[in-house]
Amino acid sequence: METKKLPETGEGISEAARILAEGGIVAIPTETVYGLAASAYDTAAIERVFSAKGRPQDNPLIVHISDMEMLREVAAKIPKEAEQLAERFWPGPLTMVLPRGEKIPASVSAGLSTVAVRMPSHPVAHNIIKESGLPLAAPSANVSGSPSPTKAAHVLEDLGGKIDGVVMAGDCAVGVESTVITLCVKPPRLLRPGGVTLDELRLVLPDIEVDPAVLSEPEAGKPVSSPGMKYKHYSPRCNVIMVCAESGFADFVNNESDCGAICFRAEVADIKCPHIVYGDEENPKTLAEGLFSALREADNLGAETVYAHAPKAEGVGLAVYNRLIRAAGFRVINL
Ligand code: AMP
Ligand code: MG
């Protein structure tokens, strides 16, 4: 099939909204990563999203809304913490897991009684939801397992010919997927770190807990709170190994034979093997922005093994660390 390249203008937005209302699937830009959108009410379109991505059926989707009225349509119950979080962080990169409303088909949530909801701040995403009048279920617009798309070109690389359209906008500002928390357990729990940090969440949820799967490998066979956390993710074809080191990263890769590196900007002068810079160590927001592009480019380094220098697991760095450790299949070297 032909994948239409739609402009990010009013016309492109109207066409995307029309295709979605007719049951099509369209990749749209958001401030986190590009999402592959479908009407959250259309079970056939949802089925197409899972199959285009090759996404495991037990990994639920996030529903994207444009206003609080839509929240009342998709969630069965809205606790007062959700109102407070919405007030502070929406529109923006925060997803809340709430009791699932009757109108949302079970397949959106992979059969769970909950639903994950987010109000994106990207104006194109906002206007497409608003014009279609539909909550949009939208996972990241990549083939399952590969790095999430932060550019329209990444979407075409993975899903060209498999989806009805892509809205061709610029690079995503945040660069990693949304922060996911659940309000369906007490105390509330961080399931996936993202652009909204733990310290920011604590201002509204002082007792929030961090799910163990955020920083380490879930135990085989044990149930996980967020099904997406059990999968290997974000991986290029080469072997990625995450390296935690206060100093000495350049010396380490220089002593390894036939490898590549994903590193911080300040290290470039010292690194002798093929490498990609993904941002500045002191500014983890830049690392989040550059991580997925760097992982996609890693295969062009021509090395079988690529060592990636991990940021400190704090602030936005926690989200980068969480994605990198999954890209590495939990292979970590501590220097
Ligand atoms: P993605 O669509 O790639 O951004 O991934 C969505 C993430 O949200 C996955 O890690 C899912 O496991 C998580 N998620 C979505 N819905 C729920 C839910 N109802 N309960 C817990 N986690 C969820
Ligand atoms: Mg994804």
Image (cartoon, rainbow, N blue to C red):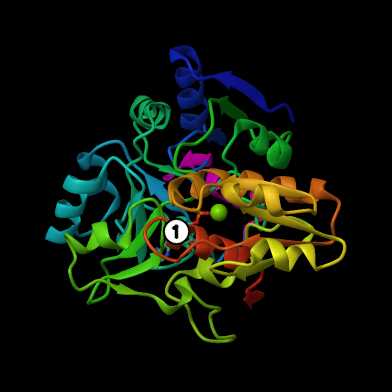
Residue type marked 1: Gly
Report the residue at 54% width, 47% height from top. 140
Quarter holding the N terminus is top right
Q: Which residue is mark 1?
A: 317
Left or right: where 254 falls relative to 295: right
Report the residue at 37% width, 27% height from top. 123
Left or right: where 323 falls relative to 297: left
Find ligand 2 in the image and state its quadrant. bottom right
Give, as a single range, the part of the protein colored magenta.
34-55
Numbered-mark total: 1
Relative to 246, residue 116 above or below: above
Relative to 95, residue 163 above or below: above
Q: Is residue 148 visible?
A: no
Q: Position of residue 185 (x, y in %)?
A: 27, 75
Left or right: where 125 falls relative to 268: left
Q: Is residue 86 visible?
A: yes
Q: Residues within 10 Å of mark 1 (few under 14, many from 20)?
A: many
Quadrant assignment, res 206: bottom left
Quarter holding the C terminus is bottom right
Q: Position of residue 304 (x, y in %)?
A: 84, 61
Q: Is residue 37 magenta?
A: yes
Report the residue at 20% width, 40% height from top. 69
Q: Position of residue 67 (x, y in %)?
A: 24, 37
Report the residue at 26% width, 41% height from top. 70
Relative to 144, residue 227 above or below: below
Q: Is residue 226 magenta?
A: no
In terms of secondary structure, where does tag 1 sit? helix
Left or right: where 207 falls relative to 231: left
